Amino acid sequence: MNNFIFQNATKVYFGKGCVKEYLVCLTKNANTVLLAYGGGSIKSNGVYDKVTGMLKEAGKTVVEFDRIMSNPTYAKVQEGAKLARENRVDMILAVGGGSVMDCCKAVSLAARYDGDIWEDFWARPGVMDFEPLPLGVIVTVAGTGSGCNGGAVITNEEKKIKTGRDYPKLNPRFALMDPTYTYSVPKGQMVSGSFDILSHIMETYFSEPNEDNVSDDIMEALMKSVIRNLRAAIRNPEDYTARSNLMWDSTMAENRVIKMGKRCDFQCHNMEHQLGAYTDCNHGCGLAVLHPVYYRHIYKEGLSKFVRFAENVWGIARDGASDEELALAGIDALAAFIKEIGLPTTLKELGARKDQLKEIADSCGISGGSYKQMTHGEILEIFQECYE
Ligand code: NZQ
Ligand code: ZN
């Protein structure tokens, strides 16, 4: 394995009833709480009433920061930071998915920083030599794993750049994860969020080293868990076992554990983020379109791992097939799964225009961890192959 340092500062409270049991205690040192949420799902599923009821009963002043959009923008971050400063907020409580949590991580930083956080922390990595505003989260959808890391993906609409940074100081202080809160997630979002989980694992698994390492073994178990539990949750959206596994799968995929000793690729994420910057497409849907095509471009350079993927994740028997045939059968199984769960398979379906593809391709970051170093020309080829 490669050398590593491991730390994860977020304390996780997991399971049915955890919000009721722990929220008041976890917010006891805050007088004024910035309650942040998205477009209103927490109002229709009753989570808003529960949370505000508990905070108000505990005597907190609650300042609301709402309408955080999917693919949160830098302008929205600035709005939240202004609200936090003006109201002398002591703590941010983010209730939602990756978009709400990511936006709030950036708000927690911007509220305590006088400069331009985009220029100093997102355009390039920065040094955070101060404490951001404390942040706690209530996770309402499985997918990004943002509840247990310092990652925040922000879109700068003016510059047409969507990019993420992971600062350990932005790890939430606590993350409350009640799988029953995800029962109300619509099927389309549940499926795209689950594909995002699979993508985080694959982007890590398909990278050096290929020698025996415990991270790859954990990842095979996680990928099988996502596939099995997503199928179960599609059959029965209120299957607690399935929903709780998906919630923990999403956390395990992005709490840094599986990245230990791995280089990590994330080329598909770099490409999807720029598609998002130009089209505002759904993150998991964008990834679903890209992955099989990208993997057909790189499998020869990572052949032994693609063979392992086919055999250990999809259970494909060799039956006299060559390594290349087996590797391609694994990628075909992934593509078939994407169709089975109803995700899009073309960029056209995501709303991308053909005449934009070159500009988008040229704006994509190039990963240093891919089995095969991409060029902007090859990214454009991948986009064109994915188009329709
Ligand atoms: O906005 P509301 O009304 O709350 O509805 C949301 C939204 O429409 C809905 N939803 C969430 N919980 C629900 C629910 N609907 C019903 N019941 C519930 N319990 O789901 C929709 C999508 O929410 P969103 O937060 O946008 O989705 P997701 O969690 O997939 O987050 C996507 C964002 O996270 C970034 C993505 O790029 C994207 O911007 N990522 C963050 C990462 C990180 N911080 O580690 C890593 C990822 O790779 C990713 O890039
Ligand atoms: Zn992702």
Image (cartoon, helix red, strand yellow):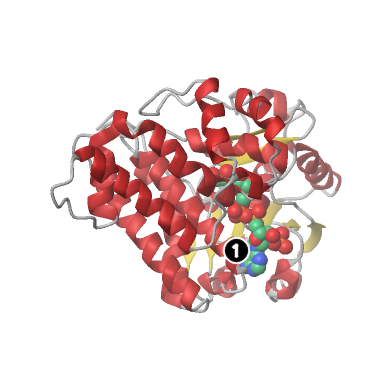
- In-front residue for pair 146/229: 229
- Taking the spot 68% from the left edge, 72% from the top edge, the residue there is 47
The quarter of the picture where the C terminus appears is top right
In the image, what residue type sits under mark 1?
A: Gly
Image coords of residue 105 (percent x, y)? 64, 44
Q: State the count of labels.
A: 1
Q: Nearer the viewer, residue 191 or 73?
A: 191
Q: Secondary structure at mark 1?
A: helix
Residue occupied by mark 1: 188
Q: Quadrant of residue 186?
A: bottom right
Residue 25 appearing in the image: no
Regarding residue 124, the answer to whether it shows in the image is: yes
Q: Quadrant of residue 298?
A: top left
> Does mark 1 have its CB less than 8 Å from ligand 1?
no
Residue 76 versus residue 108: which sits nearer the camera?
76
Residue 66's spot in the image, x, y percent? 79, 57
Question: Which residue sits furthest right?
Answer: 86
* Crowding at mark 1 (Cα within 10 Å: few <14, some 14-19, many 20+): some
Please state the horizontal and vertical placement of residue 55, each as a whole percent of the image: 72, 68
Q: Is residue 62 above or below residue 217?
A: below
Q: Is residue 136 above or below residue 58?
A: above
Could you tell me which residue is drawn at 79 percent across and 56 percent down? 67
Q: Residue furthest left?
A: 320
Give the percent coordinates (x, y) of residue 156: 74, 33
Indicate left or right for 14 with 263 as reference: right
Q: Residue at x 40, y 60 (%)?
A: 226
